Image (cartoon, rainbow, N blue to C red):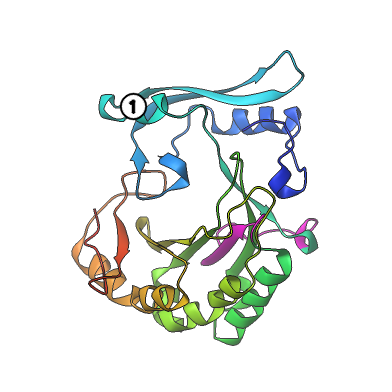
Amino acid sequence: MTSEPIKAYGGIAFPATLLRSFAEKIDGGSFPFHLDHDLTKPIRIRSVEVFVHDRNDGISELRFRAEMHADDVHFIDSRPGVSATVMSPLARDEHSPRQFDAQFQLSADHAWFEDEALIGVEERLIELGVPADSLLVQRAYQFAVVPGPQIYIDVAFSVLLSVGASAIWDGIKLLFARRRTPPGGDATTPTTVNIEITDGSRVLRAVVTTDDLDVAKRAIDSLEVVATGFQRGVQGADARSDPLAPTTTWDEPNGRWTPPM
């Protein structure tokens, strides 16, 4: 993550002052690391130190030092750098307060999904029963060389049961229909939907990656089954900052979610 402009986002960049503020807030904290922004590929680290390095060419870089599990070191050895995913308000909400504890939070990579698409999903979800004051819609910025088409959903288990998984799909399917390809992007790249179902302090992560609308529908329509099983059968501590929080992926050949790992 640097202060260098990213073409996929129209040249947007974080100024060095903001990078330093970010480093101060997260230095020494606990947060998840994943390979290639993929929730199914956690990297085990601890004792994180975050700081900003100013290069000779005037670009500032956000860097970190950490202790890493020996079995995960090869992931970093094969990557030239580390990127971050950051959520930001839509253009219409830049000067409005945000409800960070909203029970339904939806974000999508801004290079692939414009604000109008997210607003359309927001309107549809409200029509389907998601309370407007419980819904937060944001842009996602993946500060990677070429960001991928990622959708992020964080929904409380109670809201999932209240509105139903099919209603959630009915809302977010609009994003699939209005996906765009950014400069440097590959139009054939499948869309990844990352879902975090929260139940108090516990989290279940569900990931489906596909370019087939019907596959995405089957996966999301089936969320209630896997979420209910997790809620009833698993005990756990706060998993929001734990990269090893239980994660399930959609198994299309067998038409089911895999057992949470």
- At a point 59% along the width and 71% down the height, the residue shown is 175
- Residue 17 locus on image (x, y percent): 75, 29
Instruction: Left or right? Give the position of 100 relative to 19.
Output: left
Crowd tier of the residue under label 1, counting other residues whose Cα lies within 10 Å: few below 14, some 14–19, many 20 or above: few
Q: Quadrant of residue 182?
A: bottom right
The answer to whether any part of residue 164 appears in the image is no
- What range is drawn magenta here? 93-112
Which residue is disc 1 drawn over? Answer: 74
Q: Secondary structure at mark 1?
A: helix
- At a point 76% along the width and 61% down the height, the residue shown is 93
Q: Amino acid at mark 1?
A: His
Is residue 100 part of the magenta span, yes or no?
A: yes
The answer to whether any part of residue 206 appears in the image is yes
- Residue 24 locus on image (x, y percent): 61, 28
**Quadrant of image for the N terminus:** top right
Q: Quadrant of residue 253?
A: bottom left
